[in-house]
Amino acid sequence: MRDWKRLVRDRLGPLPVDGARAVDIVDELAQHVADHHAELVAAGVDDATALHRALAPLAERAAVEIARADRPRPVSPAPPATAGSRLGGLARDVRYALRLLRRAPGFAAAAIVTLALGVGANAAIFSVVHAVVLRPPAYREPSHVVAFLNIHSGTRAQIGSSSVPDFEDWRKQLTSFDSMALLSGWTFNVTGLDLPERIFGARVSGSFFPLLGAQPLFGRAIEPADDRPGGDEVVVLGYRVWQRLFAGDRGVLGRALMMEGRPHIVIGVMPSGFRFPTDDIEMWAAIKDNMTGMPRNSRFMTAVGRLKPGVTIAAAQAEVDAVSAQLDAAYPDTNHGWRVRLTTAHEAIVGDTKPALLLLAGAVGLLLLIACTNVSNLLFARATSRRRETALRLALGAGRMRVLAQWLIENLVLSTIGGLCGLALAWSAIRLLVRFGPSDVPRLDETALDLPVLGFTFAVASIAGALAALAPAARALRVSSQGGLRDAVGYTTVAPGRGRAGAFVIVVEVAVTMTLAVGAALLLKSFARLTSVAPGFDPSRAISFKVFLTPPRYRSAADGRQYIRRALDQLGTLPGVEAVASVSQLPLSDPGSGQQFTIEGRDVEPGNKPMAGYRAISANYFEMLGIPIVRGRAFTEQDRQDTPLVLILNEAAARKYWPNQDPVGQRIRWATGVPVFDASVYSIVGVAKDVKSNGLDRPEAPSIYAPYTQRVFTWLRWNSFVARTHGEPAGYARAIREQLTKVDPLQPVYQMESLDDVIAESVAARRFQTSLVDLFAALGLTLCSVGVYGTINHWVGERAREIGVRMALGASRAGIARMVVGRAIALTAIGIAIGLVLCASLARALSTFLFAVQPFDPGTLALVTLLVLGIGGAAAYLPARRAARLDPLAVIRNE
Amino acid sequence: MSDDRELRKGSAEVLILALLEQRDRHGYEIAKLIDQRSGGALKFHVASLYPTLYRLERRGLIQGRWVEKAGARRRRFYRITAEGQTVLDAQRRSWSAFFAALNRVARIRHA
């Protein structure tokens, strides 16, 4: 049995008459429609056609016509609104809105998809910002935990780490802190498991966990007593390593892990949210080594402190400045020019990622603006087509507030649906971001659609909906009932003011799109320039891998040298391997280490000693990686431990410390502060061409190479190997591991990857940024072209009669098309001009993300201008064709 | 255009009143009879008929009432009021005069 009443109600929409009468009318019409349908079916018409024919006359105006005929039957005065009736009214309005949207599926789909894109992109990026920056870290009162960053006033170098003697002085003298702690990132080779494992962790002082106030998941954390000599060495596991290596077994407590040849007792496991200082830290062991007597210029430990309650960072900073000045005066040789900057530990960890996230947030913000303009545009078009309805409702006595409320509810329904779709979009986007995002963004993997993100999404969707609805609603209300009614019976068709509003929409949309597109194009060009920078070495068919040589097997420098020699020999026998070289820190992968030195026969002011990166390499390193020697000679197999000590500079070091001189033949000494290292004299035998070791976008810093056979620093524990292979390097991974097992079965090998991948990874963060911004810009351009198309198309529709008259008066079809396209291009051009002004105001902010491209790069600006102008013109093509094909007689007769 | 509208509106009212003069009828029956008797030349659909009916009712020329029958849905039957009858008679006279005039001038015959 068909529910005829419902069918009629749905077709008719709300009847502006009082409730009981509306029921009667619907009842009567339903009976009529049912009779009509039955008769058609009896006459042999199929059901669907019959249904359509019976219902077809109930068009949008029917309800109003009927109600108008029915009035002025005395309408009972509206009862005072009660909460219940108001809710009922709301439910009715929502149902009505849904019905309207169902009846305009094209409009609804366009608006919902547009909103979903804008809201979804914003929700996804906000969830990252929230996870990485906004969400408080998993320890007590994070705003009171500060990190000590050391800055050298001369070189502007800023390093996170401090020296142990400085730390001891701070701890004794500073009164602003409740407690202070030291920690140092460390790579642990853990043995005694199935396979030797390399785990990133930290050595921490006993005060570290109490300072943070971080509680373990179970067991206990490291306590002050744990870093004193005597007793067991202890280690606390991070959640992930506990899951990965021990399958979440609580029986791990009390188990001894062999680390650096000494048993470390597992005393606790931290909850999954606890990661300090960085994401990759998975275990914390107590510092047991006696560190008194460490040199004051050996800054390799991170210092943190907890401020006393009520002490501000600024107050603590003033106190620290005073102590730094004292140390500068007392130890000019090591502390001259060194200052400390205090910042919250959280800021120190996530601060670097902020600008990039801000850039992304800005880009999605612009995208949302474009989406809002588009939806606003759709609503405008819809408001115009519904002017008659609005006017009639006003004429029939509906209050303006009532009409406005209905409007707002309709938009709220729209933005709620758009928001929900956006949320679904964000959910999938977040999975992609976490999966493919750069690995160096802290806490990125904790990104989730949690409560704050839901709240944010809801707020954005509502604001977007309201923003988009504001102008059309205001405009809809300005419709006088008179004007609208005249319109309803066909006297006028041109909606005054609509042309201006449409123009405004195009200009705003183009301006915002232009800004986004210019930013994206600059980033793209910058990225292209970056990836075309030659790294200074030949990465083809090369695979690299690393070892970390720790006690007890590699206690002395000689132990390390022996491992490297045996590994080089062993790998050299591997079929298909052309050559193998060794380097202590792989370019573009390992951080360089600065080493101070003195030049023979040259005086230096204290605290301003020359400094250069240090790399210990095998004799064939330069030849194998294709790094030319520009002066002097390369190392040879004859440079051994028992032959004269030799060094090779890179060009940057030669330029900086021997400007306009030949450094070959000059002699230097290290100035590490450790007498045994500083006693020897080294001769410079050559200068090698610069390599991009610290990033393709960074100028090469001064660097000094030494033959690995003469490598002496005991702290230099990491080492990389590079093998050049016949064919695809990835195919050699297994064979290489097997060979290295023969050298030392307990030594883990890690980070095995091709040099091409090493280079790609070094620009991963920029690639990620650039591709996201470009994606947003592409979406923005698409939305913009749809917006321009919609507005111009609507404009043509409204001007149909005018166009008809022009044609009747002799305007050519080409002329009409030119007029339409001309309007689109003129408005687009205004938008572009405003967009360029916006770009100029954002240039400074953007320039920090650019490499070798100026924010006012004329080529890029011209290209984007042409692109946007072309899109504006192309979007007007269909409406122009429509206008040119209008039949003037038909148009005028239709009126 | 609007004159034509008025004319059609006026003629529709006469047609409905004339049909109700014979006996009470419901809306669908009225629409069908107009269709049949005009040989399909005049058509009323649901959205044009009921506004006319309601307007007539509002002016007190016809009166609707609900009739419920067991086993069927209630229907609204309309009957002509005394005032409606007066208007119909007056209309008849003026239409006759109108057609006579047309006939005389334009040789349009009306049955």
Image (cartoon, coloured by chain):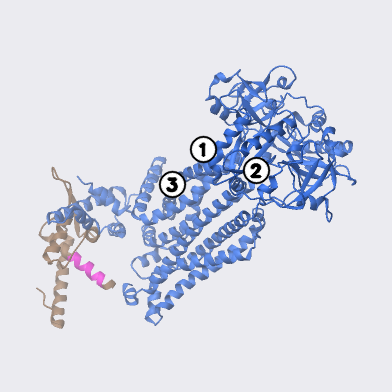
Chain colours: A blue, B brown
Which region of the structure is painted magenta?
B4-14
Say what amino acid the circle numbered 1 marks: Asp
Q: Is residue B72 above or below residue A246?
A: below
Indicate whether residue A789 is drawn in magenta: no
Pick whichever of labels 3 and 1 is earlier in the sequence: 3
Q: Quadrant of the C terminus of chain A?
A: bottom left
Q: Nearer the viewer, mark 1 or mark 2?
A: 2
> Residue under circle 3?
A421
> Residue under circle 2?
A589
* Residue A664, image x, y percentages: 82, 50
* Residue A406, image x, y percentages: 41, 52
Label 3 sits on a secondary structure element that is: helix
Q: Nearer the viewer, mark 3 or mark 2?
A: 2
Q: Residue at x 38, y 46 (%)?
A: A89
Residue A140 appears in the picture as rendered: no
Q: CA distance from mark 3 to mark 2?
A: 41 Å
Crowding near the residue tagged with mark 2, few <14, some 14–19, many ≥20 C-alpha atoms within 10 Å: some
Pick whichever of labels 1 and 2 is earlier in the sequence: 1
